[in-house]
Image (cartoon, helix red, strand yellow):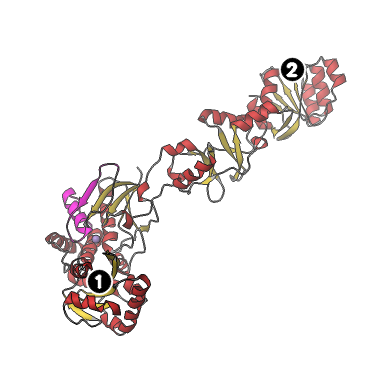
Amino acid sequence: MKKTLIFGHKKPDSDSVMSAIGLSYLKNQLGDNTEPRVLGTINKESTYALNYFNIEPPKYLNDVKLQLKDVNYHKGFFIKDTDSIYDGYQKMLKSELTGIPVCKSDGTFSGLVTIKDLSYTIINEDIEDLYTSYDNILKVLKGEEINRCSNDIVGKLVVAAYRSTTFMSNVNLERNHILIVGDRHSVIEYAVNSGVKLIILTGDSMIKDEHIEIAKQNNVNIIRTSFDAYRVSRLVALASYIKTMIRIYNPASFYDTDFVSDVIDLNNKLKHTNYPVLDKKNHVLGLLKITDLSEKHSKKVILVDHNEPLQSVDGLEEAEIQEIFDHHALGSITTTNPINFRNMAVGSTCTIVYTFFKETNIEIPKKIAGALLTGILSDTLILKSPTATPRDRVAVEELSRIAEVDYHEYGMNLLKSGTSLEGMTKEDVLYQDYKLFTINDKKFSIGQYFTMNFEEIEKEIDQYVEVLDKVAEANNFTLVALYVTDIIKDGSYVIYNTKGKNIIDIAYNKDVPEGYFIDGCLSRKKHIVPLIMPILEN
Ligand code: MN
């Protein structure tokens, strides 16, 4: 069963990370094969929780674009360069393919042989030279080993078709000759004495022991076959190493990690039928027949804590969305198939996952309870956020019992861990959670930063204002505000660009100095944007 990946939005917050972990556990308990992932760096707060409950951090997911390896191309379809042309042809015939990649003994790519190359060579060229192995000839002629002196066979084909006497007087046998002959003992004797490379005995012909003895002394290879001289002549040319047939040493090829969309783009220009597929070390993996692309195996995904493609993984349009668990407003996502879409107006996605545990009667282990609790406490600011609902409270109460923590104390430590200003620049603080808004051609942006250490920002408030001024000027924003929210004090400190002062003053209906504390201001969505929007609208 193919693995379904579960992940939250880009720039993952704790709710995204923890709901993916919790839902993946639950799904796997129900018999699915899922894995939680994250679309970005796991933040300090989530790291604190993962360490606290000893949970393995989810792996990073870069994209869900289809790669060639997700396609049923002809994996394992290739041939060694020392196999015979005949083998290559048989393989193509059996798989109904018109080309075959050839690899060297170390598995690296050597070239592509196509049916076209094969027919050109066989029709156009008089094949009288063989370059192959003893074993290849044995195999192609379904022969029997009579005498083997060398493994490599390189030579010129000669057929004993004349009368023995004519043959012997007209044909000067040399050491590089490969003689095809029936039960003509005088010719055989002539050949073994001449020390030819190989004698192919046709029609199961007998050979005298004394001739075999001479052959051994003179290093003459002998193979016997039941095929007649005509069939041998036709087939033996196909015993040559397939590498002798390579006409295309640098064909267009792809890595198995290449994106299918790129393969399609390139093929629209090249219009080849066959492309060798290689790994990054240039080893041959198989052959892509371009029609293989019609059967794709989309990656299966479940989205949590978001439903907006822009916030989701790259290549989402190529993936198969199976389910969505979210508590945000509906976005613009579309699917081709009906899906399970769980949208609840609760404080966190972890609360929805908790609800799903209840519905399915799956027991919540301590670690998972800790994860889900973390997501809810984080998103609802320890249930203080106006987005918190009674459902969140019920979940927090049960989960903290299972996780064996005092939720208030744990939540405080969790939020503190996530809000430390350590190692952060002023820009980092502004852009941590930053949103851009447009109304009537006017643009404004609001950053929100949660910390319990406003003193640290206050010390440098003038420099913060400078940063905001710069951002406002560079982007032509009417207002750039940074709200520093302290959930313990249940409010936010506002810092704004110098030119934005009049808007802030109107919003709060008083003279608002830089760093002013606004009681009860916690949610950008509920407490900030609705105050600013109407001012810029008029
Ligand atoms: Mn959330």
Q: Can the viewer see residue 64?
A: yes
Which element is circle 2 on?
A: loop
Q: How many C-alpha atoms fall within 10 Å of the one at disc 1: few (<14), some, or many (≥20)?
A: many
Magenta stretch encompasses residue 507? no
| Residue sitting nearer the eye, 245 or 447 | 447
Instruction: Classify 342 as above or below 434.
Output: above
> Any mark on residue 415, and which?
1
Q: Tags 2 and 1 in contact by the CB under 8 Å rule?
A: no
Q: As shown in the figure, which amino acid type bears the numbered disc 1?
A: Leu
Residue drawn at (74%, 34%) of the image: 154
Task: Read off the magenta span.
Answer: 336-365
The x, y position of residue 485, in whole percent, is 23, 74
The x, y position of residue 512, in whole percent, is 21, 81
Q: How many C-alpha atoms fall within 10 Å of the one at disc 2: few (<14), some, or many (≥20)?
A: many
Instruction: Classify 307 as above or below 196.
Output: below
Residue drawn at (20%, 72%) of the image: 409
Instruction: Classify 460 as above or below 485.
Output: below
Q: As shown in the figure, which amino acid type bears the numbered disc 2?
A: Gly
Separation (CA) of disc 2 from disc 1? 92 Å
The x, y position of residue 403, in whole percent, is 21, 63
Residue corresponding to mark 2: 182
Of mark 2 and mark 1, the one earlier in the sequence is 2
Taking the view exactly as shown, the residue that stands out farthest to the top is: 163
The x, y position of residue 467, in whole percent, is 35, 77
Taking the view exactly as shown, the residue that stands out farthest to the right is: 169
Which element is circle 1 on?
A: helix
Residue drawn at (59%, 31%) of the image: 115
Instruction: Classify 116 as above or below 368.
Output: above
